[in-house]
Image (tube, rainbow, N blue to C red):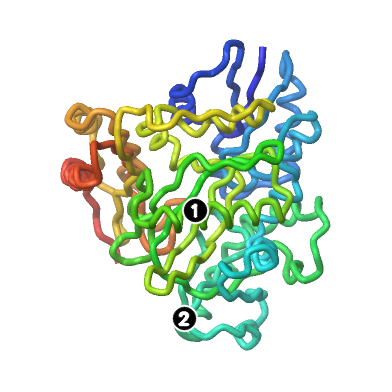
Amino acid sequence: MKNVFVPGLTDLQRGEIGTIDLADGVRLFGLLDYEALVKAEEFDFEELLDRARAELGAFDGSVDAIIAHWDFPTSVIVPILAAEWGLPSPSLDSVIRSEHKLWSRVLQRESVPECVPEFCAFDPFDPDALDKIELAFPFWVKPVKSHSSQLGFEVHDPAEFAAATAAIRAEIGRIADPFDQALARVDVPEQIRVAGGRTCLAEQIVTGTQAAPEGSMANGRYHVHGVFDMRKDETGHSFAHLDYPARTVPESVQQRMIEVSERYLRHVGYDNGCFNSEFMWDEDTGKLWLIEVNTRISQSHSDLFAKVDGSSNHAVAIDIALGCEPEMPHRKGDFAVAAQCMVPHYRDGVVTRVPGEEQIAALRQRFPGTVVRIEVQPGERLSELPNQDPYRYKLATLYIGAADHDELERRYQDCLEALPFEFEEVD
């Protein structure tokens, strides 16, 4: 009997894992809970680690695999636990090197310099921080560690920089303080320390067509099992679609993305884990930019893999965590193409109505295989919701399959019309 533990395991994840053929005798268990690991406004890294140890220690059976599917703190807790239990996992150092945006950029500059935007570290609590940044406006500012796209801002002048750093100073401690607890476990180079977990990054703005390879490194063997399009909305700031398989960048460019990802991962010593990387390709110049590398599967990709390939990417994560050769079917699913799509809203307001179960059921009957995840509830004010990016509010997430990309787009528009949301606008 093999017992696999997934921190913060949700019902949605259980459903996605249900699309794969688990070997006989493999059982799935949660570890800690979603509220503590993902939704908590504040948390103590060492306390969460001790709670996880206690749960595993009290388990009546063997602990055979532990898998990270969430961002920090889960992404860092898992390699620590896996090392303590003697299980396959990436090393803590290799994970933190990619989690820390400044450290990752420095290592990218060493290994794939042709793909790295200009960047500069700064202390957001330094009143003279702007004077020490050598980039010309406009540029991005963001903490070296945050949740999703939170506290990331495009700034065009000193006033916007001041407003952005004020917002960062007010919120950065939520992730920075526990991240400092994790950083204390590794040897951080002097040039990376700056202001510890409260360090920020100013970064050159790059443009182009965005795509994302996903794959694995297992016992030194590198493999990519899919490439995704990452399509932005009309504002150009936030993602509207994740489309699979990718078609907006040529195959030759996808291969460059795959090769760059491998060079970086080998440079940081990453092994026995999954990854997804994000790139921007400028068609006019041919320039390829590396945005970031995440040391886990993307859960946003899971349902899309199942729709197109016949199995979610959880299959690869479980194989590697159990020390097995990873396997993934190819184009065995019910659809030729699939997409994760956002239902966005761009103004603050109080939610007064969301789609009901009957409307969602009717939509699923109309478009079989469609998954609808409502992200808001009546009575909630959008600006007070956790884990929203600075440029739009996410009302729902759709997972749609189709026979081709034109049909996929039509289905998305039909879904938007069939899912009514209403708001009381606020100033």
Which residue ends up furthest to the bottom in the rendered image? Answer: 131
Relative to 122, 237 lies left or right: left
Could you tell me which residue is drawn at 66 percent across and 59 percent down? 100
Q: Position of residue 317 (x, y in %)?
A: 58, 33
Local crowd at mark 1 within 10 Å, few (<14), some, or many (≥20)?
some
The residue that label 2 is drawn on is 138
Point out the tag, 2 or 1, that comes first from the N-terminus: 2
Relative to 46, 414 lies left or right: left
Question: What's under tag 1, amino acid-wise?
Answer: Gln
Q: Position of residue 260 (x, y in %)?
A: 58, 57
Question: What's under tag 2, amino acid-wise?
Answer: Pro
User: Which of the 4 image quarters holds residue 301?
Assistant: top left
The residue that label 1 is drawn on is 255
Q: Position of residue 239 (x, y in %)?
A: 37, 56
Could you tell me which residue is drawn at 75 percent across and 44 percent down? 91
Q: Is residue 352 above or below residue 169?
A: above
Could you tell me which residue is drawn at 24 percent across and 41 percent down? 404
Q: Foreground residue, 145 or 89?
A: 89
